[in-house]
Amino acid sequence: MLTFEPFSLAALQRVLPYIREAGVSCSDLSGGALYMWQEGTDLCFCEWNDTLVIRQDKGDQPAFSPSIGKDPDGMTDELLKYVESNHLPLRFFAVDGNALEKIQNDRRLKDPMWSYDPRWSDYVYSFEEAKTFQGRKYSGQRNHIHQFEKQYGAPDVRFLKPEDLPAVWDMLSEYEAEHTPANRLERLELEGTKKLLSVYGSLGLYAAGLFVDGKIAAFTVGEVSGDMLFIHVEKALKRYRGAYPAMYSGFVRLMDALPEYDLRLVNREDDSGDPGLRTSKMQYHPIRKIDKYLVHVNSPAKRMPSSPEIASGNVVLTPFRENDKKEYRALNTDVQNNLYWGYDYREDASITGPIDEDTFYNEAMFDMRVGDSVNFAIRLNPQGEMIGEAILWNFTSDRYAELGCRIFPQYHGLGYGKTAFRAVADFAERTLRVNVYARCLNENVPSRRMIEASGFQPCCADGNYQYFSRKAER
């Protein structure tokens, strides 16, 4: 049986040779990204028969990297046994086009469902073009660098030395004063940058700075995998106009001078859905983008009928509709109503841009395309407005699913939640052929009463949650 080792710096250092020998192209699987973004993801590693698999929470559920190493075929057999015995779904993250094709052609991996979010696609550039920005299409970058040169002289870009780090920390303090993080993702990125600066050398990464009169105007941190240079961090101060293109091109030239590499591509990673960052990355003329798929194998959602409608008592459950966006946004952003559901949109790292009526609707649509959830809008009549949501999720390989329900406060206490909960549980058992369970926070008395009134019985508890099973009724 596979054994996964929790994240530590020593563990990451040990598995990095697998990653670099494979020449991975997805930034999610690079050493720097794994180190920067491991907080809160339950990141862990498994080595088996000279083969590596990385496990990481994606969307509050575990997912596995494509296998890297000597025996990826044997690792698939082991993964199938692992998820079955540990009551987990079999999901894969950081799946590029080639890996997706392999999953589709593997008969052991039944009924895969997948999707990608363009916010997380990597931008890939020509290494040769980045060195000089030659040609008409790069006139904007050259003009910015010329403006920098007029004021500060030729860009002085050097690899960072230990004695340079105090100047980098000073620069970061000024950078933080200039940039107030707009969301949790931006806060995590800044925290990850600081952590990476402290260990980049021990991970075999490279860091360089753009120096002006002994101060750091910009810095970057990168990593080599095969013929690709990943750039994990790019920071520049606003007052140094032209610092970003000068830093980028200067760093590429530094890396080009290292004889041990034959670099052809630069991966500047994703835009996180930030419109300004997307515009900037496009202005540097990517030669391609790497779409990174999330894949769910053998999800019960594959058995969903098209446009199901469930009528039960005084409620009707339907798929989400375009005109539900406003209500769904209100349902997700009601902090007090979501308190006992264990959700606070302000701490949701998947929200990367300004919140609008598409934000939560698009997230739900993505989850359903992948097979991670089945979401129903609760209505009082087939054409009525959404008054709440019932969701089936946490599908496991041994055919279990979790059921949750939330309703707008003005509809509490009228029996709608109980009716919807029972109806979706019946549907899940009969149509999707899964065993349904539920949970609620220990202090959430109204939810516990609703769950029990829907035919569920307590089965176990932990420090935070009471769990309920419907097996007795079946």
Image (tube, rainbow, N blue to C red):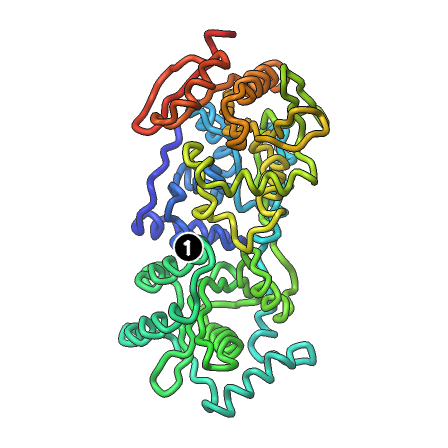
32 lies above or below 445? below
* Residue at 43% over, 49% down: 18
Which quadrant is home to the N terminus? top left
**Neighbourhood count class around disc 1 (C-alpha, 10 Å): few under 14, some 14–19, many 20 upward:** many
Count of residue discs:
1
Q: Where is residue 252 in the image (x, y as percent from the top left)?
A: 50, 73
* Residue at 38% over, 53% down: 35
Q: In this view, does 196 lie to the left or right of 255?
A: left
Three-letter code, disc 1: Gly
Q: Is residue 211 left or right of residue 134?
A: left
Q: Where is residue 337 in the image (x, y as percent from the top left)?
A: 46, 35
Q: Is residue 123 left or right of residue 89?
A: right
Between 407 and 80, the residue placed more toward the observer is: 407
Q: Position of residue 137 (x, y in %)?
A: 68, 77
Between 406 and 34, the residue placed more toward the observer is: 406
Q: Position of residue 151 (x, y in %)?
A: 48, 91
Residue linked to disc 1: 31
* Residue at 48% over, 59% down: 225
212 lies above or below 368? below
Work out whether residue 256 can be spotted: no
User: Helix or strand or loop: what does disc 1 sit on?
Assistant: helix
Residue at the top extreme of this rendering: 473
Between 379 and 376, the residue placed more toward the observer is: 379
